[in-house]
Amino acid sequence: MRVLVVEGHEVLGNGLRWLLTRVPWIERCTLAHEPQGGYDLALVDVGLGLPMCERVAATGARTALLTSRWDDVSLRTARSAGAFGVISRDLPARDLLAAVRTLARGGMPEPRTGVTGGTRFTPREREILRLVGAGLTNAEIGAEMFLAPGTVKHHMLGIYDKLGARNRAGAVHSARRLGIVADRREPFTPPAEPVRVLVADPIDVRRAGVLLALHGRPWVEACAGARTLEDARAMAERLDPQLVLAGTPDLRLPGIPTLALREDGTIEQRVEGDTGSVSPRERDVLFAFAAGATNPVIASQLGLSPNTVKQHASSIFRKLGVRNRAEAVRRADELGLLAA
């Protein structure tokens, strides 16, 4: 069986390719960015768009869409793009390979996720969230995405409901905490000296891709992976890591420097910036923004007048170089001002 993986993220693509080449019934697996002929199966990243799926399906390969735990893609949507199923990259390796096997045998893998009980978002909702975090208004988002402002507002109401948020600032904060929208893409700066690295990540495809990416890097003395917190603790005793790359916050190990893995497998590098100019009281207001509190609620919680809250908000916007609360929350989170 020959398999083509059309993936927009190099780390995830390499991880998936590595897993697929471990099974005896797959003769060849190729990672590509464009359609290629001569393959029996094709797995296409939904982030590349449904037209890409249509182009790949036109080569004659039996095709499935690759999704993440936050993507809401129905089997009907996949079929409209020429695909025969939907496979989540976040599934445990055994389940993911079983889904590919189902596709190979003529079945239709149903959409499901490796994260139980997770709320999922359409590609359009995720793009709107990203633009909200960039500080755009509904009208500006509509112009960017060729949507009516009323349609954007309708999508925002659905986003609030899914995130349990009361306003744009609260939605941005929740979306960033959950990893639904990516952090600002600052390039990762490797350590000056070689270090031992532990990759603690419950997502098999991403963990495999990150380990492959680390192999042979001059700043990596040794590296190992772990799927659970228990595994991470056991591996830490053997490896004595100097850096942990964590796929989820609960896999951080006390006393060991930790960086987060983004959804696409790249390493989060905190944005540098001057946080000293933000006063403790302004930081309190920022925390309230992130919680979705209104000015009267903030005033009541902090023992301030609503006008004083407005003054603090104006000062925060000026210091962070932003236009509104949603953008302020995103920027404050990037600078570590919202760290507990």
Image: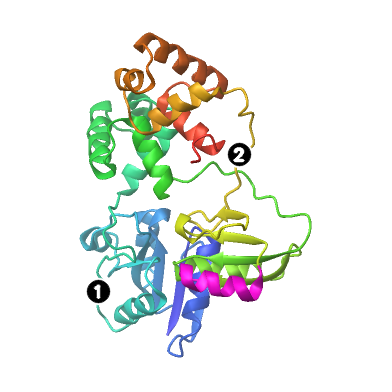
Choose between 182 and 303: the one closer to the eye. 303
Task: Give the residue displayed 50% in from the left and 37% down from the top.
Answer: 333
Task: Please indicate, yes or no, whether residue 180 appears anywhere in the rendered image.
Answer: no
Looking at the rendered structure, the secondary structure element under dot 2 is loop
In the depicted structure, whether residue 301 falls above or below residue 6: above
* Residue designated by label 1: 108
In which quadrant of the rendered view does residue 164 lie? top left
Q: Where residue 281 is drawn, which disc sits there?
A: none
Disc 2 to disc 1, how far (Cα)?
A: 43 Å
Residue type pointed to by label 2? Val
Relative to 193, 81 lies left or right: left
* Residue designated by label 2: 271
Task: Give the residue displayed 65% in from the left and 50% down from the top.
Answer: 188
Q: Residues within 10 Å of mark 1 (few under 14, many from 20)?
A: many
Q: Residues within 10 Å of mark 2 (few under 14, many from 20)?
A: some
Residue 234 among magenta residues: yes
Percent position of residue 337, x then y? 53, 34
Q: Which residues are magenta?
A: 226-240
Residue type pointed to by label 1? Met
In which quadrant of the rendered view does residue 335 lie? top right
- Between disc 2 and disc 1, the foreground one is 2
Percent position of residue 71, x then y? 33, 55
Looking at the rendered structure, the secondary structure element under dot 1 is loop
Relative to 225, 96 lies left or right: left
Percent position of residue 257, x then y? 63, 55
Choose between 156 and 231: the one closer to the eye. 231
Q: Quadrant of the N terminus?
A: bottom left
Percent position of residue 256, x then y? 62, 58
Furthest-top residue in view? 307
- Of callouts 2 and 1, the N-terminal one: 1
What's the magenta bit mostly, secondary-structure-wise?
Answer: helix
